[in-house]
Amino acid sequence: MHIDLKGNHTLKHCLAICIWIALGLVAHAESGGEANCPDNGIENARTHDEVWLLSCRSLDCPKQGSPVHAEELTEGLPAWQFNLTDNKWDRSEIVNFWKASPTLQTVVWVHGNLTTSSEAFSTGLTVYRQLIRAAENQGPIRFIIWSWPASKTLTRRVPDARIKAARTTWAGLRLAGVLQQISGENTVGLIGFSFGAQVISAALEVLAGGELNQTTLKPQPAQVSYRVTLFAAALDSYWLLPERRFGQAFNVIDSLTLINNYCDWVLKHYGKLYCHCARRGPSALGYTGLAVGSLSAEEQKHIQQFNASGSVGKQHAWRAYIESKTMMELIRKGTFGEGQNNPRLSQQVSTGSQ
């Protein structure tokens, strides 16, 4: 029998090359080859950060009436801290949360509707990881996931959304209690999606001295300003304007970044929260944007608006924004303040692409 030694040698050579290429691809994947995949190496390198989840899901509505103390709003608030070394959640006490280093910059993430208690953990952690991906020069942060009762309650979509819309007010009141007790800072970053934007707006209103549901927050001498980023915001488009529901919020806002989507199929029907026909109800802020004509020139300088439809299309999903490089860069800048040396109002913005 004749054996072609030359051909056998060639086969072995080809196999060796294939194995070498395969090992190279594996090494590339393990080193974070995908641009939009969270890099655990980055997270592990930032063990100086703190990641917390605070949940008001098990708490009753705050009492109404006279000014309430911030401590009353946070009493018994369940807390969890994510161990950045072991990559696991540990149950903690709210008293440990208050012991955080005053040198940390606080960033708060508030999720939207139809988010369960377990999803709040994973969703928030994903937002944190994407937020720090391209922030190598960003100092230590304390990232807070604010979990509020947004789980599905009713089968019918619109009645269920009405229930959640009502809950955003007291969830915002309790968030205000947390924010008022955070000391040692001048600026806090707030990020909200969908109804999460309404929770944040409610918190800012009472922090600025406003009243919601006949309830006010006892004022605190130390004044903190907030960098606010809202995307696909599910609240009435005019509520942040003077003399409206959240009209005092601008008194404590340092910068406001609105990432709107004029194609969002859910926000298009936002008006159905008020009636069966969406055309008769108000429009959503995240759908039409904020009409800034009634604001002062100084207030307008601190507002930036962007159209996300080119990047996310008709979707009403937090992940579509977080996984878009363009949108994530806007969120990052709105939160940490990059590019704030030249603030400008931009209602017609570059949509970019993922």
Image: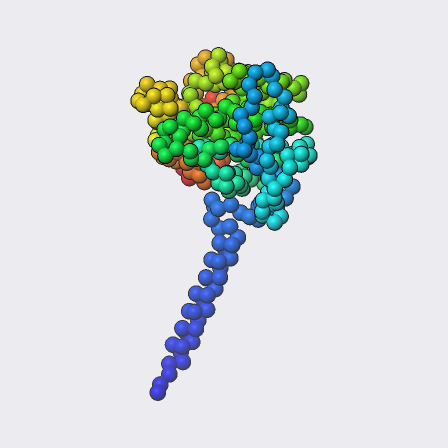
Observer-nearest residue: 349 or 267? 267
Q: Position of residue 283 (x, y in %)?
A: 38, 21
Q: Give above or below for 85 relative to 17.
A: above
Q: Say which quarter of the image contains residue 80.
A: top right
Observer-nearest residue: 77 or 33? 77
Q: Position of residue 163 (x, y in %)?
A: 43, 27
- Compared across the picture, whether 278 is left or right of 65 comes to left
Count of numbered marks: 0
Query: How is this picture coloured?
Result: rainbow
At horizontal 68% and vertical 28% (from top left) the residue drawn is 184
Inspect this view and state whether residue 107 appears: yes
Inspect this view and state whether residue 332 appears: no
At horizontal 48% and vertical 46% (from top left) the residue drawn is 37
At horizontal 54% and vertical 39% (from top left) the residue drawn is 128
- Compared across the picture, whether 144 is left or right of 166 comes to right
**The N terminus sits in image quarter:** bottom left
Q: Give above or below for 24 relative to 279.
A: below
Q: Give above or below for 9 relative to 199.
A: below
At horizontal 37% and vertical 21% (from top left) the residue drawn is 274
Q: Say which quarter of the image contains residue 79.
A: top right
Q: Position of residue 136 (x, y in %)?
A: 59, 40
- Compared across the picture, whether 95 is left or right of 264 comes to right
- Compared across the picture, whether 75 is left or right of 265 comes to right
Q: Give above or below for 1 relative to 234.
A: below
Observer-nearest residue: 53 or 73? 73
Q: Position of residue 260 (x, y in %)?
A: 42, 28
**The C terminus sits in image quarter:** top left
